[in-house]
Amino acid sequence: MSLMQTLQLPNFADFEANNIPTQLTALIANSKQQIEQLVSEPSLSYADLVLPLEQIDDAIGQVFGPLAHLHSVANTDSVRQAYDLCLPKLTEYSTWLSQNQDLYKALERIQQSDEFNHLTPVQQQDINLQMRDFRLAGVALGAEDKQQYAELKQQLAQLSTQFSNNVMDATDSWSKHFDDSKHLLGLPESSLAQAKQLAASKGLTGYLLNLDFACYHAVVTFADDRELRQTVYTAFNTRASDQGPHDQQYDNTEIMAQLVSLRQQLAQLVGYDNYAEYSVASKMADSGKEAHDFLQDLAQQCKPLGQEEMAQLQAFANQQGGPQPLQAWDIAYYSEKLRQARFDLSQEELKPYFALPQVQAGLFAIVERLFGIQVEQVDGVPVWHKDVGFYRISQQGKPIGYFYLDVFARQQKRGGAWMNDCRTRQKLANQQTQLPVAYLVCNFAPASDDQPALLTHNDVVTLFHEFGHGLHHMLTHIDVAGVAGINGVAWDAVELPSQLLENWAWQKESLLMFAKHYQTGEPLPAAMLQKMLAAKHFQSAMFMLRQLEFGLFDLRLHSQDAAQSVDVQAVLDQVRAEVAVITPPDWNRFQHGFSHIFAGGYAAGYYSYMWADVLAADVFERFMADGIFNPQTGQQYWHKLLGRGGSADAMTLFMDFMGRKPDVAALIRSKGLGEAA
Ligand SMILES: [Zn+2]
């Protein structure tokens, strides 16, 4: 039997998207029948109820999961059509399931029975979280309200998909062609090679720029031609909006207003003042106010430092004969020049030391050393694109998890980087343990004909970040699906393992395991390493303020009264007036591409990055004290925190490992802003 069959992996090599809607319809009908049958039993034990439910859930994931994944990474017409057909069915089913009063009652009977006391704490937590989610989904509502809830969920799912499609289509439909490189002065060789390759792939000579993040980033950071920077900045920051060069059919303005308004209605329907309160009800933060105050306090600490950084940047630009005031499309350009002047180091110079194959091998070697595991590539598993690899993680020769790795940007692939689950660890009916499988996705500039993909250090950090999520999913010890890996983990704690692992891309000891010149094999020279580390906190306050701006915008947007119509732009403008040190032009429509909160799971939850960063910074201080490769600390972190997934609440896990509560000052220290604390 092939590995694909053993692990029941999707056959991506021969994937028939248009069969999925029919399969899913049949499966959903069957699942409903099974569940109705189940709950008609007068009394059910944990094993009678929860295990069959897990299997039903897993079966649906096996059918719909691969399609949802392809919708993000290989968004062909047939995939999009099939997905659009499946989405309403699945949304209807999840609502039916999550509001099923009989199912809730059956769980409640277990919770109140003597059996509950004999369940493991993991099983108890699973039941408790399931019941909480039933309440959040309005299980207690009357029939009419339930109907309204279901309709709201349908509309929200459709609008989110439409938002995401608009961003993707607007991104893909813009490009700019140049016959020669005279307007592209300043761009690094690797970016020019990309642009040339892109042109060739469209049958053109010369150079083609597009809105993939790597291309956008290269232009605004390096292009000497100010007009070109403005053109590309404008195209990127007006995607899917009423502004800029884009087709109006992709405009997300109305969709965003509707999303926010429908979310508020949903929250109020199930008894919360607003969506922010509804969102934090399942998070580590006690209230929307606590999350908001947390961000606002940080913003107050960072703002004077950010203003100082901005003043230094302007002064530097003035010396260079640059514009005053600097515009949004000048910031990255002069920042890079200032970084070079101050640290004598360009991001570009580092890239030859971060060729993807070496970085990947280094990442694997680091986690192998840290956790005593092995990571290796496995051939013969069908994938959706030739650049995708499949890997196994084992411990003492025994497999414990697997992952797909898809790192390059391309057309019909959503931007950004993420981890998603393909299989969750759980005990199956035959008593076998299903091993976890993850999808790890990034969007790095691909290799060119004559050189491997060379990553920026920022890309390296991104890869480590996503791998941290992957480890959370794959190294779990829990085999109760509802709380295994990232399942059941409070959303504002979910970025702990990812942000923690980023640190190993910043330590001399770990960096030197892989930072070697791709042509000469020469290790990253000590002087360059020193400069790179010295530059780590360059414009750190400005970066923090950007993140705080996004987080505050998100929380305030979702704290509005449902009765009022939402002025998304006004909320953002207000937050910027308080927090930002860079004021973008009036026509900037950043929010129209802010998929995290409009199409992803971060609505009223973007603050989670910063919140979890406190946890990660704090945990890393312990690694720094014990040694970043201290095997005992690695094992303790794995066994007391990482491996326990959602089987206990995030604060409990944190305190089990650290022996105390989190310390916000650790975040400030980790950003090199210690003097502000
Ligand atoms: Zn993350």
Image (cartoon, grey):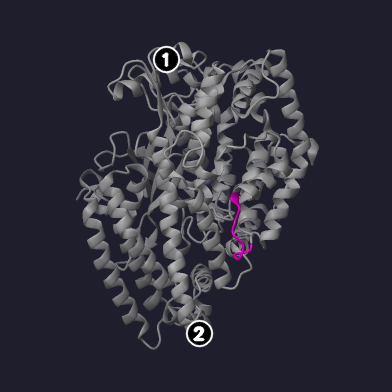
Nearest the eye: 138 or 239: 239
Which is nearer the N-term, disc 1 or disc 2? 2
Tally the numbered discs.
2
Instruction: Find numbered disc 2 in the image and state the secondary structure of the residue it sits on.
Output: loop
Q: Given the image, on which type of amino acid does mark 2 rest?
A: Ser
Q: Is residue 207 left or right of residue 108?
A: left
Regarding residue 93, the answer to whether it shows in the image is yes
Q: Which mark is residue 473?
A: none
The C terminus, quarter of image: top right
Q: Position of residue 147 (x, y in %)?
A: 44, 75
Residue 527 position within the rendered picture, expressed as x and y whole percent measured from the top left:
62, 16
Q: Is residue 178 above or below residue 174?
A: above
Contact (Cβ within 8 Å) of mark 1 with mark 2: no
Q: Residue 537 at what x, y percent from top left?
A: 67, 30
Whole-angstrom CA distance, mark 1 to mark 2, is 67 Å
Say whether mark 1 is within 8 Å of ligand 1.
Answer: no
Task: Check disc 1 and report the residue beneath it.
Answer: 519
Looking at the image, residue 350 sits to the left or right of residue 358; the answer is right
> Which segment is the magenta one?
561-568
Q: Position of residue 38 (x, y in %)?
A: 34, 80
Chief secondary structure of the magenta span? Answer: loop
Residue type at numbered disc 1: Gln
